[in-house]
Image: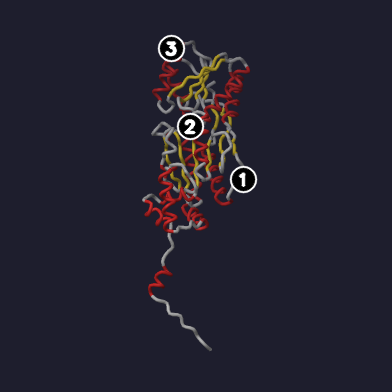
Amino acid sequence: MIVNLLYWAPEEAEEKMAKPPNIHSVAARAGVSTATVSKVVNRINVGVSEATRQRVEDAIRDIGYRPNRVGRGLRKLRRSIIGMAIVDVSPSFLADPFTTNLVAGLSNHLSTQGFGLLLHGIRPHELKSSFLVRESEVDALCVTLSGSRRERLGYIKLLSELGQPFVAFQDQPVAAADACFVRQDDRAGAVSLARHILQKRRVKRAVMFISELSWPAIEQRVSGFRQVLGSKRVALDLVRCDETRAESIAAAAESCLARAALPDVFIGQNDQVALTVMQVLKRHDIRVPGDVGVSGFNAFPFSGFADPPLTTARSPAYELGQLGAEVILDRLETGHFRQKEHVLAVDLVAGSSV
């Protein structure tokens, strides 16, 4: 038997054992972050200038880096982090009960499945430059968007270009790549409330307090009230205020009382607004529901302190967050969203305030 012995020089061994170029090598050579390299490799242009992209591509070519798509996918799954962007002007966005319940449902379900939540409040028009879009490499995104319909469509287009799956809460479905829309039926809830109000009292004029900032859910609530009240020739006046500040709500209510005759019903876009209006009415010795009716929306536990009990609609905000978590995790597991939209019902809570 002849055995061939091959001599392997140490320098050859060192060459054989040298690690191939990786994303960190490219980042170091180009002078950028690994997140930027990842965007260039995945052909994501958001947040990457043409000069930076060219520098990264030159570095990839110079060192012979070959992206391992399978390996990168496995590493991505191991991050186990979902990003949540809430586009809101208020720095105290988490003080809003709807947002608090939605985020709690989302976070708690993700936690049970071994995932974390990276939460960011982002001011309008700053989504493109935000950390979640520019640098963060989360597995997927969830968003709650404010602004006009046109502005929200722009945000959704931006998110579609990131090449990541995302769930949009409370918005109507539109054509968007790798997206799912999860919402409650605010319009149907408002329709039920309006019909109940008309059954309980004679209404010729209603005043609805809504936020200065546009939200898709509030648009749907206004639409539902307009449908029912308009069909009965009931005038609906909209009064805008900063719904995050009790003094702004109270000032709007005081202004209404000072400049016009008492309407038949005051409608709050949510229970916080309705409760504040009831306090103003009480200071003026205006009886609820004797002199005027009041209704709210959301039916979170604190609304139970209203006297008389508030007529409102129950929002499944916590369940909405849970559903969003289930949907996005299923997308990561299967590679696709099973359906474009999920809608939860909103139930009438018949108090005695109308």
Q: Which mark is residue 338?
A: 1
Callout 3 amino acid: Ala
Farthest residue toward the right? 231
- Are the residues flagged by discs 2 and 1 in contact, CB closer than 8 Å? no
Alpha carbons under labels 3 and 1: distance apart: 53 Å
Picture disc at residue 235: none
Q: Residue at x 41, y 69 (%)?
A: 15
- Left or right, residue 230 beside residue 288: right
**Residue that carries the numbered disc 2 in the rendered image:** 146
Residue type pointed to by label 2? Ser
First reached walking from the N terminus: tag 3 or tag 1: 3
Instruction: Tell how many labels.
Output: 3
Measured Cα–Cα span from mark 2 to mark 1: 26 Å
Which kind of residue does numbered mark 1 sit on?
Arg
For the C terminus, give its image quadrant: top right
> Could you tell me which secondary element the residue under label 2 belongs to?
loop
- Residue with the mark numbered 3: 258
| Residue 91 spot, x, y in % from top left | 39, 34
- Residue 84: give x, y in percent of width and height: 46, 42
Pick the front one: 77 or 150: 150
Residue furthest to the bottom in view is 1
Q: Are marks 3 and 1 in contact (CB under 8 Å)?
A: no
